[in-house]
């Protein structure tokens, strides 16, 4: 609670950092799930957008376009983009 109060007192940038981290954590969780699915050799169906690497790549690019994004968030986002590239390649091989 203390941290939230400090963030509120600190202005909008800190709250934006919190949002960035929450968004990144959500994306990371989903990328890990896609990796798990891909490692089993499962083919990701086209009918569900959230199972498509491109969907998550777009979300990451939106996050990276955030003005003043922190360097650590940008670095983590770039690492997730690399993972998505691997997932997309694995999906091409399964077809």
Image (tube, rainbow, N blue to C red):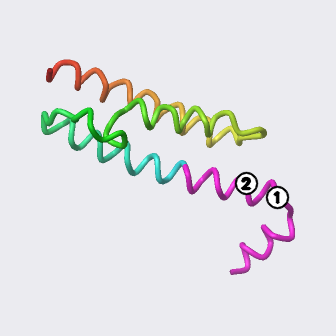
Q: Quadrant of the C terminus?
A: top left
Residue annotated with mark 1: 12
From the top left corner, tell me how far across and down residue 20 is, in percent: 63, 50
Residue under the image location 32 percent in, 25 percent down:
86
Residue under the image location 22 percent in, 35 percent down:
44
Reply yes or no: does residue 20 show up in magenta. Answer: yes
Residue under the image location 14 percent in, 36 percent down:
42
Residue 50, compared with residue 84, is above or below; it is below
- Give SS at disc 1: helix
Q: Which of the 4 quarters of the picture holds residue 71?
A: top right
Relative to the observer, which residue lies in front, 78 or 63? 63
From the top left corner, tell me how far across and down residue 28 is, in percent: 44, 47
Residues shaded magenta: 1-23
Q: Which of the 4 quarters of the picture holds residue 61?
A: top right
- Give SS at disc 2: helix
Residue annotated with mark 2: 16
Q: Which of the 4 quarters of the picture holds residue 5?
A: bottom right
Dominant SS in magenta: helix
Answer left or right for 83 relative to 77.
left
């Amino acid at each position: 609670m203390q941290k939230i109060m400090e963030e509120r007192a600190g202005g909008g940038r800190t709250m934006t950092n919190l949002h960035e981290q929450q968004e990144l954590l959500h994306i990371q969780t989903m990328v890990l799930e896609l990796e798990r699915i891909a490692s089993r050799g499962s083919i990701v169906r086209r009918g569900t957008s959230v199972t498509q690497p491109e969907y998550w790549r777009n979300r990451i690019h939106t996050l990276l376009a955030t003005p003043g994004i922190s360097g650590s968030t940008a670095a983590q986002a770039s690492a997730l983009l690399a993972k998505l590239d691997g997932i997309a390649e694995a999906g091409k091989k399964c077809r």
